[in-house]
Amino acid sequence: MIFLDTNYINGLIIKRDSHNTFSKNIRPFLANEAKATNVTVLVEVLNSLRVNNFEGNFDAIISKLVNLDIFDYLSVEDYQKAMDLCKFYNFSINFSDCTILVSMEKHRINKIVTNDSDFDKIKGIQRIGGFN
């Protein structure tokens, strides 16, 4: 099982995204992996698409993400755990990334495809990514 972060997904969808080449190159290696993401990533992807004047089918993207092997809707308790993690890491890991960590822990996922090096700060997490 592997968690899909925003910058990987944006790289697949937005052709001029700085992560486009990485995302397209790594995609075949993830073909046989079960995939997960969460509501935070969905919100970030939709906001990025809006900012980048995406003219494609938003409904298809939403459907693809929510129908992954795991799509984690966060609870009030999950958001509290994410805030606790932010505080534990002295806010060196942002709140959105902490919600991802909560989802990963909840579903016992230890691999994430992302170029966000903040995940390197977390013991037990294997980051699959190229650059920051």
Image: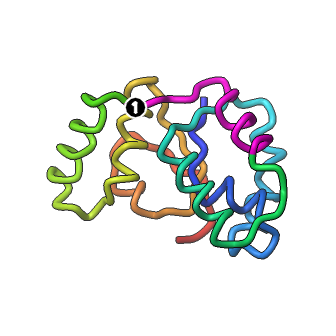
Relative horizontal placement of residue 41, taking residue 53 as reference (left or right): left
Instruction: Give the residue drawn at x 75%, y 36%.
Output: 64
Horizontal and vertical percent position of residue 125: 43, 43
Q: Front-most of 42 and 81?
A: 42
> At x 84% / y 45%, what residue is drawn?
28
Res. 81 image quadrant? top left
Out of 90 and 77, give the one closest to the viewer: 77
Instruction: Name the quadrant containing residue 115.
Output: bottom right
> What's the coloring here?
rainbow
Where in the figure is residue 10, as x and y percent of width and height? 68, 60
In the rendered view, would you say 70 is above or below 60?
Answer: above
Identify the residue shown where x is 32% and y is 59%: 94
Residue occupying image coordinates x 33% and y 45%: 123
Q: Position of residue 69 (x, y in %)?
A: 66, 23
Disc 1 secondary structure class: loop
From the top left corner, tell me how far across and down residue 100 is, in percent: 43, 43
Which portion, as a residue range, is magenta? 59-74
User: What residue type is disc 1 on?
Assistant: Leu
Give the side of residue 49 with respect to residue 80, left or right. right
- Does the stretch in magenta take in 10? no
Q: Is residue 70 magenta?
A: yes
Dot 1 corresponds to which residue? 74
Residue 6 vs 109, above or below: the answer is below
Image quarter where the N terminus lies is top right
Q: Is residue 76 above or below residue 28?
A: above
Count of number-bearing discs: 1
What is the crowding at mark 1: few (fewer than 14 residues within 10 Å), some, or many (at least 20)?
some
